[in-house]
Image (tube, rainbow, N blue to C red):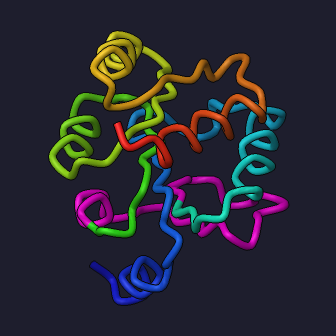
Amino acid sequence: MAHDIKHLLDEAKQGVVYFSLGTNVKSTLLSKKRMDLLLSALSELPYKVLWKVEIDDMDNIPSNVEIRKWLPQQDILRHPNVKLFITQGGLQSIDEALNSTVPMLIIPFFGDQHFNAHKIAHSGAGLALNFHDFTKEEILEKIHTLILDPT
């Protein structure tokens, strides 16, 4: 793992939210309105947010959000300061999160991701969010539930 990422994870004493939509779901699928909603919600978190996103010209990036085009997902998920994984719900991402015992907030887009999100929510390992119509309050509530609820 790159030294700067390890340092960021080590120093995030309140915890880290790791956010990645994987390799097949591009963040450009999110409308500006959805992106602004996400950034607004993330800005209210007391946690550091590491977000793998391939957009070069994002505006209004909150001070607690670190944007990178690529991140070593398995290494990040294994770090003890990681409290939550926001993911698209691809099978490999789910497997890596389960192996690292990191709860998931799944935002499914297509294919098996909807089924996977349902299975994870039913199992208690995470919650799902509909990317077409989520609210700021909903995303914050689900993040807080997943991080603070010991189950």
Verify whether residue 57 appears in magenta: yes
- Picture residue at 31% right of the left edge, 31% below the top: 125
Whether residue 63 appears in magenta in the rendering, the answer is yes
Find the residue positioned furthest to the left.
Answer: 99
Q: Position of residue 53 (x, y in %)?
A: 55, 53
Q: In the image, is 37 to the left or to the right of 4?
A: right
Viewport quadrant of the C terminus: top left
Residue sitting nearer the eye, 14 or 84: 14
| Relative to 29, residue 84 above or below | below
User: Which residue shows up at 74% across the image and 73% down it?
Assistant: 63
Q: Position of residue 33 (x, y in %)?
A: 83, 33
55, above or below 78, in the image:
above
Q: Is residue 76 left or right of residue 98?
A: right
- The residue sitting at 35% across, 89% down in the picture is 3
Q: Which residues are magenta?
A: 51-78
Report which quarter residue 131 is drawn in: top right
Seen in the picture, residue 55 relative to 4 is either above or below; the reply is above
| Total residue callouts | 0
Residue 150 at what x, y percent from top left? 38, 43
Q: Residue 141, image x and y in percent? A: 66, 35
Near-viewer residue (141 or 129): 141
- Residue depicted at x 75% and y 46%: 41
Quadrant of the image containing the N terminus: bottom left
Image position of 12 with respect to 22: above or below: below
Does 120 sit left or right of 61 as displayed?
left
Residue 118 falls in image quadrant: top left
